[in-house]
Image (cartoon, grey):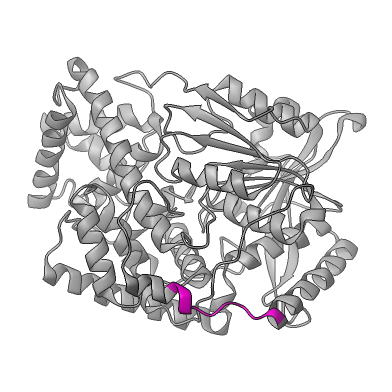
């Protein structure tokens, strides 16, 4: 997860965390009932008002024929006649004949903190052609994101400050520095968010979906969520089962309330260690191209030489160990990053720093967007669930975990540490679960070696959503299965969205071929504290 975080083998948490989880207050029954009535009222208003679509704001950089509009949702669903916020929405109409049209397909890419406004551009992608003929493609920016009542917690220039450090085994003095930063960040969120801060949470994201459904004139929601989008999509299915049409859950978050979110993040760090090994093994197989080592350990040593080099003298004055780590984290998300990341390491050791600078240096033009995404990520995860409030718990768990999973453990912890000092009340996570017959069939997609949303999460979601089908991409680790290079997965998604068919008993399919060495791939980019937003695609 910047996302959304998750699973794998995990350290056993101590009694302090367990007691905190047990003691955390849940939303009361009265508040839950009041919010449910608030959703009904807001949805009725939205159905009457609809969405007036017109030219998209220039800031969205969306081409014709995509149009944009807004939908009003309550800030607080227990007060539906109180303050409202506007969510921005994008749309491209179904391109097929009227008899082919099946309604609107709403997409969320994850996070928390990611915007899906770009989604209608998928209509131009060849393997989306038949889906785009049948559905209006709908993107939107969730509450807090982009132009949707945007949340900010610090100056964007401070957010992407560079170079920064990223010690695998931090000293006590470094830990104190990060604790102070986490406290300041949480206080910044409180100042900026004010009374609205507690209302950035997953339950409200799910409720917003139902208001959006009504505003689009849909009796039932057809939805595709990726990474974190699977979590509040699953909450939606639990809260509004009679409003579900078809739902695709791509790269699923583990929805077990005991996992949200502290344990999920620990599990995620374990999974990233495995993916880091996958990347280094691939680089070693192509030593003739990269000259970084003939086995994974030799490649790790080459990487450590680069880390030591940028720690001593940051590349381009902006790429230190923190920016290097953020860039290399992308290799844990997407196989497509492997060639360019390996090439950057190789070129650096040959004396050419430019590829690493291009891929890892912060981008000032994206600072505001990255800071906004980080603010929403933090607010949602901190508001959703109880977190340990004693740093000794974080220290114990992450110190132990870093001994066997050093690649991402402490960076993951620092990203989430503001939740230890969060000013808004924390709630017990909502339960995701449906009974047989409550939902139409739903489709879950997962890669077996996904690090951002480890595979155990998809299995857990499959258990909790009665009647769901799970399609597994075997021996694959790219985060986000739909819309990729696997034609078999694409066929499953298309058959489901167009005909409502899910594979009997789910299915398992092999991964597409690994990337070729030496070229192509995604350049990606670095940044400051916000690098984990990749996890959100979370998450995510």
Examine the structure image and report whether residue 27 is included in the region drawn in magenta: yes
Q: Is residue 61 visible?
A: no
Q: Residue at x 79, y 47 (%)?
A: 437
Figure label count? 0
Examine the structure image and report whether residue 281 is included in the region drawn in magenta: no
Q: Residue at x 17, y 37 (%)?
A: 353
Q: Which residues are magenta?
A: 21-29
Q: Picture coordinates of residue 420 (x, y %)?
A: 36, 75
Residue 42, compared with residue 328, is above or below; it is: below
Q: Is residue 266 left or right of residue 82?
A: left
Residue 211, compared with residue 514, is above or below; it is: below
Find the residue positioned furthest to the right: 99
Q: Picture coordinates of residue 154 (x, y %)?
A: 39, 72
- The residue lying toward the viewer, choosing from 101 and 204, is 204
Q: Is residue 498 left or right of residue 265?
A: right
- The residue lying toward the viewer, choosing from 209 and 50, is 209
Q: Residue at x 39, y 65 (%)?
A: 156
Residue 98, compared with residue 468, is above or below; it is: above
Q: Residue at x 82, y 58 (%)?
A: 215
Q: Is residue 292 visible?
A: yes
Q: Picture coordinates of residue 529 (x, y %)?
A: 33, 60
Residue 504, compared with residue 149, is above or below; it is: above
- The residue lying toward the viewer, choosing from 455 and 313, is 455
Q: Quadrant of residue 295?
A: top left
Q: Quadrant of residue 409?
A: bottom left
Q: Picture coordinates of residue 231 (x, y %)?
A: 58, 54
Q: Is residue 360 left or right of residue 213?
A: left
Q: Is residue 505 left or right of residue 366?
A: right
């Amino acid at each position: 997860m910047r996302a959304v975080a998750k699973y794998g083998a995990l350290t056993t948490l101590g009694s302090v965390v367990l007691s905190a989880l047990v003691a955390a207050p849940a939303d009361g029954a009265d508040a839950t009932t009041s919010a449910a009535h608030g959703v009904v009222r807001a949805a009725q208003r939205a159905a009457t008002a609809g969405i007036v679509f017109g030219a998209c704001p220039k800031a969205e950089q969306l081409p014709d024929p995509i149009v944009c509009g807004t939908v009003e949702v309550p800030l607080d669903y227990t007060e539906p006649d109180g303050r409202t916020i506007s969510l921005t929405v994008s749309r491209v109409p179904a391109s097929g004949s009227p008899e082919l049209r099946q309604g609107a397909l709403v997409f969320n890419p994850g996070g928390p903190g990611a915007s899906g406004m770009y989604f209608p551009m998928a209509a131009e992608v060849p393997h989306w052609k038949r889906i785009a003929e049948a559905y209006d493609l709908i993107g939107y920016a969730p509450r807090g994101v982009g132009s949707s009542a945007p949340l900010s917690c610090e100056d964007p220039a401070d957010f992407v400050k560079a170079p920064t450090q990223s010690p695998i085994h931090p000293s006590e003095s470094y830990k104190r520095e990060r604790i102070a930063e986490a406290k300041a960040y949480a206080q910044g969120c409180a100042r900026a968010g004010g009374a609205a801060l507690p209302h950035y949470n997953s339950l409200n994201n799910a409720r917003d979906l139902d208001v959006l459904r009504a505003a689009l004139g849909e009796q039932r929601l057809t939805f595709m969520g990726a990474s974190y989008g699977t979590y509040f999509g699953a909450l939606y299915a639990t809260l509004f089962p009679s409003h579900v049409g078809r739902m695709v859950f791509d790269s699923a978050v583990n929805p077990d309330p005991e996992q949200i979110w502290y344990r999920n993040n620990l599990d995620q760090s374990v999974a990233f260690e495995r993916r880091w090994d996958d990347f280094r093994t691939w680089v070693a197989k192509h030593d003739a191209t990269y000259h970084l080592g003939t086995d994974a350990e030799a490649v790790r040593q080459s990487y450590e030489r680069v880390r030591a080099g940028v720690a001593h003298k940051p590349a381009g004055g902006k790429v230190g160990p923190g920016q290097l780590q953020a860039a290399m984290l992308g290799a844990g998300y997407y196989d497509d990053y492997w060639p360019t990341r390996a090439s950057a390491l190789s070129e650096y050791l040959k004396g050419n720093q430019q590829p690493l600078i291009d891929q890892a240096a912060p981008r000032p033009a994206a600072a505001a967007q990255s800071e906004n995404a980080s603010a929403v990520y933090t607010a949602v995860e901190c508001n959703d669930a109880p977190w340990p409030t004693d740093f000794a718990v974080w220290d114990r768990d992450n110190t132990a975990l870093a001994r066997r999973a050093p690649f991402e453990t402490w960076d993951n912890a620092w990203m989430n540490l503001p939740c230890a000092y969060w000013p808004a009340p924390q709630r017990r996570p909502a339960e995701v679960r449906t009974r047989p017959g409550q939902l139409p069939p739903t489709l879950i997609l997962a890669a077996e070696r996904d690090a951002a949303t480890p595979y155990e999460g998809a299995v857990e979601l499959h258990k909790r959503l009665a009647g769901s089908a799970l399609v597994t991409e075997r021996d694959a680790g790219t985060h986000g299965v739909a819309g990729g290079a696997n034609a078999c997965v694409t066929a499953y998604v298309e058959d489901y969205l167009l005909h409502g068919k899910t594979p009997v008993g789910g299915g398992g399919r092999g991964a597409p071929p690994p990337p070729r060495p030496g070229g192509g791939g995604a350049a990606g980019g670095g940044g400051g504290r916000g690098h984990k937003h990749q996890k959100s695609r979370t998450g995510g």
